[in-house]
Every structure is written in C-alpha cells, then in structure tokens.
Image (cartoon, grey):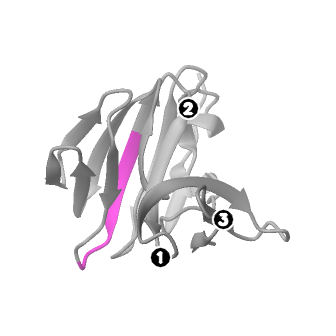
Amino acid sequence: MDRTTVDDVDDRMSPADTKRKVGDAIGATDMALNYYELEPGDSFGFGYHRHSDQEEVFYIAEGTVTFETEDGEIEATAGECVRFEPGEWQLGTNEGTDRVVALAMGAPKEMGETEMLRHCEDCGGRTEQDLELTDDRDAILTICVECGAETGRFD
C-alpha cells in the first residue's frame, strides 16, 4: 500500500491554478489520478482534446465545470462524475466565479495519442496544436501546427 496527502504532491505547470499528479505520488501503474483546483477561467486541458487510448472520469468535489463536448456544452456540479470514452473530444473549464476542486482519473495510465485543437488568431480558426516548453523551462506553450504561431502560454 502507498499513501500520500494532496498537499504533499508537487504542483505542475498546467492551465489549472493547481494540478497535482497524485497517482504518480502513490505509485499507480495502471491509471492516472490528478487533483485539480481551477480558478475562474482555468481549464483541465491545454485545449479541446481527445486521448486515443484513455478513458477519463472527472469527479467534481466543489464548484461547477462546463465541459465542451462533441454534443454541446454540459455542466457538472459538486458531487457529479463525468466520463469520456477513449477518442471522445472534450475540455472542462471553470466558467463560474467560484473555485473548482476536482479529481481526474484516466485508464490506462498511458493515454496514447492526444489530439488538441485551439483557436489560432493567425489561421483564423481552431487548428491542431503541439505543446512545447519554453527555453528556460518556466512555461508550456501551445503552438499551431499549421503556421507555428504561439496560441497560449501556461506557467
């Protein structure tokens, strides 16, 4: 058995105010388990995305999350769980005024290929994106695959 507290796990750079890879801290080998705190405007992901091989389940402990999905937007509130099949497009964002606290569970741990879309001002629409670390490794950038423009920066 392995055990930890969320506060003992290091925070990671992400589009969320707080992201802690709790699953890694307890040695989980077959699933990912991440703890999130989202300030208003924060999201779980760097963009609208899907994982080819990973099923994801989000448990909302506090607040309300708006998930953009292929079928439109849905809201999930405290006490609710939302599941996405492998290959299903989604992005969860805190569009409210209260802080969100949530757990994200993914299985298998290795998510396979991740496709991500974000708005690119230079291309005039949503385009495929890549992630890059800045040279000084203090932020993650989203980069448009089509034109190479930076579309987001996350510290």
User: Image point 25% across, 71% down: which residue?
Assistant: 95
Residue toward you, 155 or 133: 133
The magenta stretch spans residue 129: no
- For the N terminus, give its image quadrant: top right
Circle number at residue 69 = none
Is tag 2's residue or tag 1's residue first in the polypeptide sequence?
A: 2
Q: Which amino acid does the dot numbered 1 rest on?
A: Glu
Which residue lies under the disc numbered 3?
Answer: 148
Query: Majority secondary structure of the magenta segment?
Result: strand
Crowding at dot 1, Cα within 10 Å, few <14 / some 14-19 / many 20+, comes out as few
| Coordinates of residue 117 in the picture (x, y in percent) | 44, 54
Residue toward you, 82 or 123: 123
Residue 64: which quarter of the image?
bottom left
Q: Which range is magenta?
A: 97-104
Residue 83: tell me if it is visible: yes
Is 24 placed left or right of 105 in the picture? Answer: right
Position of 41 relative to 43 (above/below): below
1 and 3 marks in contact (CB < 8 Å): no
User: Image point 32% across, 71% down: which residue?
Assistant: 99
Q: Secondary structure at mark 2?
A: loop
Circle number at residue 113 = 2
Is tag 2's residue or tag 3's residue first in the polypeptide sequence?
A: 2
Of the two numbered discs 2 and 1 in the rendering, the one whose residue sits closer to the viewer:
1
Q: Secondary structure at mark 1?
A: loop
| Coordinates of residue 44 in the picture (x, y in percent) | 42, 56
Which residue lies under the disc numbered 1?
Answer: 121
Gap between marks 2 and 1 measured at Cα: 25 Å
- For the C terminus, give its image quadrant: bottom right
Q: Which amino acid does the dot numbered 3 rest on?
A: Gly
Extreme right residue here? 136
Gap between marks 2 and 3 measured at Cα: 20 Å
Of the two numbered discs 2 and 3 in the rendering, the one whose residue sits closer to the viewer:
3
